[in-house]
Image (spheres, grey):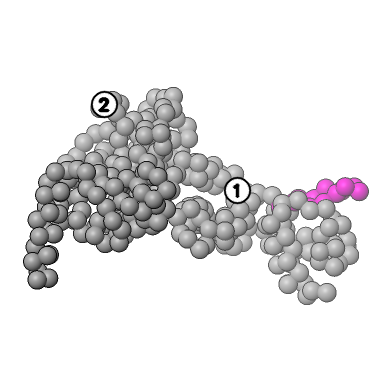
Amino acid sequence: MLQTSARLLRLLSLFQVQRYWSGADLSDRLDVTARTLRRDVDRLRSLGYPVHSTSGTAGGYQLGAGATLPPLLLDDDEAVAVALGLRTSASSVTGIEEASMRALMKLEQVLPPRLGHRVAPLHAFIVPLGGRDSAGRGPTVDAERLSAIAGACRDQEGIRFSYHNRTGAPSARVVEPHRLVHTGYRWYLVAWDLVRKDWRTFRVDRIEGKLRTSTRFKPRKPPEGDFAAFVSKSLSQVPYPYQARVTLYAPVDAVAHRIPPSAGVLEAIDDSSCMLRTGSHSLEGITIHLSLLGVGFRVHEPPELIDYIRQLTERLRGATG
């Protein structure tokens, strides 16, 4: 028979895997009598774990959400941060997806209602964009701001905020927020801009000042058919002076891991080739990127890129004698 402390940990672990247990099942799992089980449950309650019980032949025990977090111990902001980190890692960090989801399920079972209200919109309105931001580790984003934006997405409330673009120019924005998209290192808000009458992406770290809510709105259909695809296209093509369309002579699955969504958009042509749409500030940047993929390719546009690669090919031939 397990010692009392080890048995309490085992009992708590059972409650976090499955919320409701019959008294008989718990007694069998722990190899104790019903009386000992009741004493163990009372000990958990004294430690702050909200264990509810029902009597009768079908009676049992259930771990509930209390007024405060039971001893892990985490404060409110830490609990929200852990839930957000687990959700993000479960969808964007390979190798720990299953473990992250198990830990997230255990945490959510004991979150008090006020924290569940904060965490739910973060999960429902955050879209992971596969791969990592090619620009490296991005600036930090305030978790409270993420919660507020996600809550506005959930409640379908317009928001007003101050925003500065990549050159630092400030502007006042009035938008209908729809989704938060996480690229791995940066957070983007996808929203309908009421002034410009079009979809826009906003880097959350560039949103300044206090968010102000405005009127309610009806959700619109996602741009490009998908919020993550819209952000991917915005990041890989729209900001750059050179935008390329290239056929890669390899299956899309074979090169997808080399081209993060923030660096290009891939579309399958057939089983042995795919189309890449990408952009860069320089022809050299696109050429180097294509050369390092390790597959054959054909450039369709822009004409400047085709001419640049032809000239580079002649120089390389001359360099080899």
Residue pictured at 21% horizontal, 36% vertical: 171
Residue 234 placed where, x, y %?
29, 41
In the image: residue 218, left or right of residue 206: right
Q: Which residue is mark 2?
A: 195
Taking the magenta stretch, the answer to whether it contains residue 26 is no
Residue 209, quarter of picture: top left
Taking the magenta stretch, the answer to whether it contains residue 60 is yes
Start and end of the magenta stretch? Answer: 52-63
Q: Quadrant of the C terminus?
A: bottom left
Q: Nearer the viewer, mark 1 or mark 2?
A: 2
Q: Which residue is mark 1?
A: 112
For the question of whether residue 210 can be seen, the reply is no
In the image: residue 194, left or right of residue 131: left
Residue 235, quarter of picture: top left
Residue pictured at 15% horizontal, 48% vertical: 306
Residue pictured at 39% horizontal, 25% vertical: 215
Residue 172 placed where, x, y %?
24, 34
**Do residues under tags 1 and 2 come within 8 Å of each other at their CB atoms?**
no
